Amino acid sequence: MPKDELKGGFRLIGTRPNRPDGLDKVTGRARYGADIVAANMLHAAVVRSPHAHARIKKIDASRALALEGVKAVVTRADFPTGLTGEDWNLQENTIAGDTALYDGHAVAAVAATSALVAQDAARLIEVEYEILPHVTDVDAAMAPDAPVIRAGYADHSVPEGMHPNVVRYIDFGHGDTEAGFAAADLIREHTYKTEATHQGYIEPHACLGQLGADGRGEMWVCTQGHWYIRRMCAAVLGIDAANLRVTPSEIGGGFGGKTTIFMEPLALALSRKAGGRPVKLVMSRAEVLRATGPTASASMDVKIGMKKDGTITAAAVNFRMQGGAFIGMSPVTEALQCAFACYDIPALMHEGYEVLANRPKAAAYRAPGAPMAAFAVESLLDEMCRELALDPLRVRLKNAAKEGTKSSYGPSYNRIGFVETLEAALAHPNLAAPLGPNQGRGVASAFWFNHGGETSVSLAIGEDGTVQVSVGTPDIGGSRASIALMVAERIGIEYDAVRVNVVETGALGVNEPTHGSRATFASGKAAVEAAEQAIAEMCRRAAAEWGIDAEAVEWVDGAACPAGPNAGKFPPMTIAEIGAKMGGTGGPISGHHESVPGGVGASFGTHVVDVEVDPATGKTTVLRYLVVQDAGRAIHPAYVEGQYQGGAAQGIGWALNEEYVYGADGRLQNPVFLDYRIPVASDLPMIDTVIVEVPNPGHPYGVRGVGETGIAPPLPAIANAVAAATGARLRSLPISPPKLLAAMKHK
Amino acid sequence: MTKIHVTTTVNGETAEFLTDPRETLLDVLRNQLGLTGSKEGCGTGDCGACSVLVDGVLVSSCLVLGVEAQGKTIETIEGMADPKGDLHPLQRKFIEHAALQCGFCTPGVLVAAKALLAQNPDPTETEIRYWLAGNLCRCTGYDKIVRAVQDAAAEMRGAA
């Protein structure tokens, strides 16, 4: 679509109104997971394994139960047996069975009349452990002498002779890689490593759960997806899903880490055992870092063949990723699928291994797998461009995937905007900024699929013509504002006349979480469909009053109007007039839509960063940062920019500071924000953004989804900029000052 | 453990509570006084989500004991708008600039930014970034937060 058509014709879309939850959030009124109380409420605390791998020989809670105020203790014995597959994984992670599998694994939980008493009681629960050998590094976990974390869990895909910790093997590709490499002028191959990082949402997990002896219960919880909470808690506890009503709180960040359960069933189990009294359970930061999230750690081989003009002739990758001690948590498939998704390469081979290690059960983290893959592939591409004296953005342009390209992971692309992001980056003034001594510029690109997912939305017309929209996707970054904009645009009313509510599980059909960059895409698309139904009904009401055919009525600017001169001469009937009398014209007017929406549009991004490295300390300072990404269409551009900037900041943290540090004892050494250092305000510059808009044909307003792509390019872009500044190429993250200083000395 | 009686002033009003000497000021504000606008993100003084003013000094309330509030004057996010509900310029600018996403860090950032502008009405970008370095935000990348503080400072200087 030509650029001049993109902005035109909209009254509200593309504007920047205040978000509906803004006032509550700047005054402290917004209620998050830990901000609620219930009558007769108890407080819980969790006993966690201090060992990376240990057999649980005995749990003695008698001293805890004797403490005044203690009402219940639960262990694995209080949960049903016989679960299989992911349900068993969830239960096993919620509370250890025979064996503690990582430092921080829950072993028991206690409920008491105050948080202080619960914490005292937790310290009185005596657990006898037999310490077992452990392994936390992904390569070490695959070595022949590695301790076996779980025997017999490898699936049929794993080649014979591999260590039992390797539980899944995946391979795919296309073309003749041998011929492709033979046609290359330059072939390079290196190994890259990234450490685990945590989503680092500032709000720790918190919930208030109540469960009676009749198996009926309620939960208030900070989550990205309350239907997931319902299903998972029901499975782990052996209760019926419909009997658990889950209400999402405002959510203090998630980034994928709040799409699953960690401690929620413990609150419910304690409540059931304490006679149905509500139980509040709030994690500490150390519990969050030790026992929730994080992402996988990765070890990755990449081989690329390139012609002298920059044409990529073939590529091959072999990725090894651990996602903790649980099957199915390593995002190795997604990493492989994203590795070359930006490019049109005639011959590709992808291989990957999912590996178990004595670490917490990994959760999704913003474009799971994509940042690691981008680090490996985009770093090597950059090295090869330098070696061939080619411009890295123009090499990406030469090889860029376009509409119709068969993607590296299989399907052919619909309309995509990768080329447009590269062109916008090339045209940006940051690319012309002069660089001084010890300074360097790096670029990198990345891709994320985006996601549709199960979606259910209701919309109802009020008696005054205002509109309420009920969605099931918790609002983290402004989705209530963007959904209200789309509904108001379609119906032809003011933005403030639409109120979007995130409603509890009892109010709608199943909704997947706010994940996969789907909330504005999927709930927005469903809300527009629901608005169409309500509009059709309002046209019918007007037609009935006018005594003409419904087909002779059209909806224009918030009112029903006769469609053309033959329909008759009637003044427009506004939504407010229709709403005021709907009780007498047939009853409530609403719209409802549920689907797994198709038409998902992938989002591509290109980042450009300038850094300066202090030659004395190895400290990297980010001087300038540019995010260019295709949004499809930015419904509320300020919140699109916010996603770009926030994603970039997380990627910068991953590149420079953040890592899980395990000691030789297998314990996490840095489970506090002082030591697990996420970027602070003084670490970052302003983050420049360019919103490219290549509308997604699969959405009524062209939305693609923007949340995730932006975290991936910073990892390689910064490594590339550091290499340009210093000549030192770091192939493992983070690029911490001592690591970089050592590399600079040995280059 | 024996509880201790504390009398203090919170957002201009006298407040009394009984506290276990192990309880933090943050616990007391949230659990006893119902002021849940101050958040606990870490409990170790690293994230700033619990920022309040005690006798005009910016502190992490998770590092202050409830008993230390005796005789002090405490200001929290709930006291930032005027009693009629008119927002402080910082609050208004944070909404206008989209300087919040999840909003969990926002109360602490606002309290800290207000303390900055009280002593430096015209801070540079660098001064804002270093002052707010004790307030972690994981959503925004800080760009829009810094711009909102700059804009609020400009408006407050103009109004003064």
Image (spheres, coloured by chain):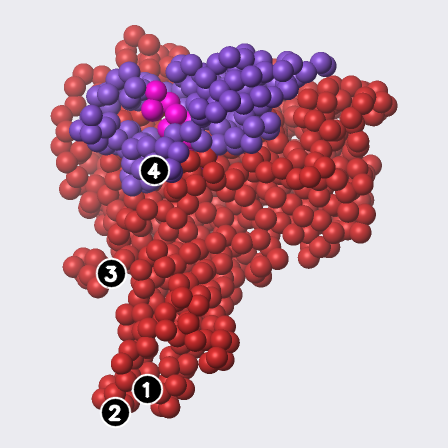
Chain colours: A red, B purple
- Is the N terminus of chain B in the top left, top right, bottom left or bottom right quadrant? top right
- Which mark is drawn over residue B70? none
The region drawn magenta spans B102-115
Residue at the spot of label 3: A11
Where is A56 relative to A704, above or below? above
- Is the C terminus of chain B in the top left, top right, bottom left or bottom right quadrant? top left
**Which is more N-terminal, label 1 or label 2?**
1
**Discs 3, 2 touching: Cβ within 8 Å:** no
- Helix, strand or loop at label 3? It is loop
Residue at the spot of label 4: B86
- Helix, strand or loop at label 4? It is loop
Q: What's the CA distance linking mark 2 and mark 1?
A: 8 Å
Do marks 1 and 3 both belong to one polypeptide chain?
yes
Q: Residue at image x 75%, y 40%?
A: A277
Predominant SS of the magenta segment = helix
Q: Residue at image x 39%, y 48%?
A: A20
Mark nearest the camera among 4 and 3 is: 4
Q: Is residue A569 visible?
A: yes
Residue A520 x/y as whole percent: 40, 54
Classify residue B35 as left or right of residue A78.
left
Residue B119 x/y as whole percent: 28, 16
Q: What's the CA distance linking mark 4 and mark 1?
A: 49 Å
- Helix, strand or loop at label 2? It is helix
Q: What's the CA distance linking mark 1 and mark 3?
A: 25 Å
Residue at the spot of label 1: A552
Q: Let me know if residue B111 is in the magenta part.
A: yes
Residue extending farthest to the front is B14
Q: What's the CA distance linking mark 4 and mark 2?
A: 53 Å
Residue at the spot of label 2: A566
Do marks 4 and 3 both belong to one polypeptide chain?
no
Q: Chain of mark 2?
A: A
Q: B14 or B25: which is nearer to us?
A: B14
